[in-house]
Amino acid sequence: MYRRLLLALQSATLRLDTWVNRVLPQDFNPLYYTGGLANLFLTILVVSGILIFLYYEPSLEGAYASVEFLTHHVPYGVVFRGIHRYAADAYLVAILLHLFRNWFTDRYREARDSQWLSGMFLLVVSGFAGFTGYLLVWDERSQLLTSLTTQALRSVPLIGGWLERVFLGGPGVSDTTLPRFLFLHIGPAMTLYVLLWWHYVRLRHPKIWPPAVWVLFSLGLLFILASALPAASGPPAQPGASPEGFQVDWFFLWPYVLARWTAPGWALALVVALVVYGMVIPYTLRETPEQRGLRALGQAVVVEENCTGCELCYYDCPYNAIYMVPSPYPGKSRAAANRKLLAVVVDSRCVECGICIGACPFEALELPRMLDKDVQQRIRRGAGAAAPVAS
Amino acid sequence: MTEDRSSWYVALAGFLAVLALACVALMVYGEWFDRRLVASGAMGVLLVLYAAIVVLFRKARLTAEE
Amino acid sequence: MAAAPERMETQPRVVGFLCDWAVRSEGLLNPDDTVVGMPHVTVIRVPCSGFVKPGWLELALRSGAAGAFVCGCPMGDCLNREGNWIMEDRIDQLRKRLSRQKVDPERIAFFAYGLHEREQFLQAVADFVDRLRGSGGKQ
């Protein structure tokens, strides 16, 4: 049932691709650049965030006023604030598209679990940074979010009190709280780049930037949104006040909508459960390749006597699964007699796609269950030649 | 038929370019008279128009894939 | 779509490679690799279009095929991220090499069709065969 659902979703995703390709030129299809779009929005966030940071004052008395100053008195300050606000939403949308697309098209299995795991971490850290951004304004919404979060953290068994103190930067809301929030906003944003390194490390030529058309369009859209619906603060936070409701940003604050109906602790537990489930997805579906309707051709094997150390397979492998190592001894074929390097396949990264075989002009790589000589036999049969033709 | 289409795309791109010029005028107006939201909104429309022009040029085969 | 049966024996032979992830191949091929309804076209399924060695396409031409093609997923949609881009590059290089050797480079083709585009794929193969016949097939 679950598997059928995923197959249907895969089919729908690919159908959507071809449909978009009919409208747009193929290399402009935004669905092929969901990761690049997320990276674009992250860059916009960092640049606009630095500009806002120059004006921000992390203190209980000054925070709200400094944001108001930025909004109303700095030229185009409100635009930058709006861009930061809407780019965050667009960033999360791009991440979720990226997640679902790669989930539905099976691009998370086996050798690609490292990208999936780092992606889940990126999602969590991004969500957290987005949430702490709402605290920095220090209006009524920030105050309510702070108290809800504090309640949720306090209800964590054993380490609840400690978590609360870490979150608030002290035993309660005090002058050290907003510098702590500021760190909790910018620190995770920097962590994202460490995680992105992990996200890319097993990929050769990762597509990290969308085509120019989408850079123009996304920036333009953000400018339009920031001008048409300027970002604004709520009423300032009052010590001792207990505000009731707030304007919800559904992308980042949905757990708090849940917290309205249940105890905040349960909302936190649900978020944790979702993330943990997300992380085990690559390990839950233990189907054999036959059950998935695939032929298991076996991982690529280097025919070491033919390898010339030319590095062509190394450059073409999309997963960085081939390493070039110093050759311990010369190869047997004439071309390989003077080699300095030898290709080695890293089993845990190989997905059995065979791209390295197509790259190799020296017959030095084979997929164990689809050998070069068998393919040649089938080609000759198809081409109508009974016997091999001398070249 | 494709020839017909591509000239139509170019005409549309030309029209969008005129609109983009109007956006530049709006940006100058907004900056001059201190209506900065108008200026930044015009900037956003301008960027979106440029994106559309890039797509139209490609569909008219004036630019090629990479 | 396929040519009329009485013209079948005059059809040029074609060898192709089809990515497992591109056009859905259930019921597409006979057990001897030929396409159902097109006995002159042999299609070998491969795990990714990037698996195909350019030498195999040359071998097909040398062994008597009038043409050879590779079909991958739509560009950008490759399960292995860039198998079809790599294959397209290799085919471009192979074409240049062939034209230096005075072999018509149009005998090699690259297609990109997705899971749901079987009709378009078959049409493209039929058009390719027609082109080959028009240019005199094998020399």
Image: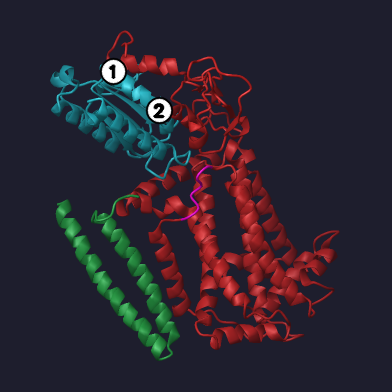
* Residue topped by disc 2: C52
In primary-sequence order, the first of circles 1 and 2 is: 2
Q: Nearer the viewer, residue A29 or B14?
A: B14
Residue at the location (18% across, 23% down)? Answer: C137
**Colour in which chain B is drawn:** green
Query: In the rendering, at what x and y percent does residue A171 appear?
Result: 85, 74
- Image x and y of residue C91, in percent: 34, 33
Residue C62's disc is: 1
* Chief secondary structure of the magenta portion: loop
Q: Give me the chain that's red.
A: A
Res. A248 in view: no
The quarter holding residue A389 reads top left
Give the chain of mark 2: C
Label 1 or label 2, whichever lies nearer to me, is 1
Q: Position of residue A207 (x, y in %)?
A: 48, 49
Using residue A32 as the reference point, say whether residue B16 is left or right of it.
Answer: left
Let me know if marks 1 and 2 both belong to one chain: yes
**Quick check: A93 above or below A58?**
above
Where residue B47 sits: x, y (%)?
Answer: 38, 70
Q: CA distance from mark 1 to mark 2?
A: 16 Å
Q: Chain of mark 1?
A: C
Q: Eyeballing the image, is A125 above or below C123? A: below
Residue C77 magenta: no
Q: As drawn, is B35 to the left or to the right of B62?
A: right
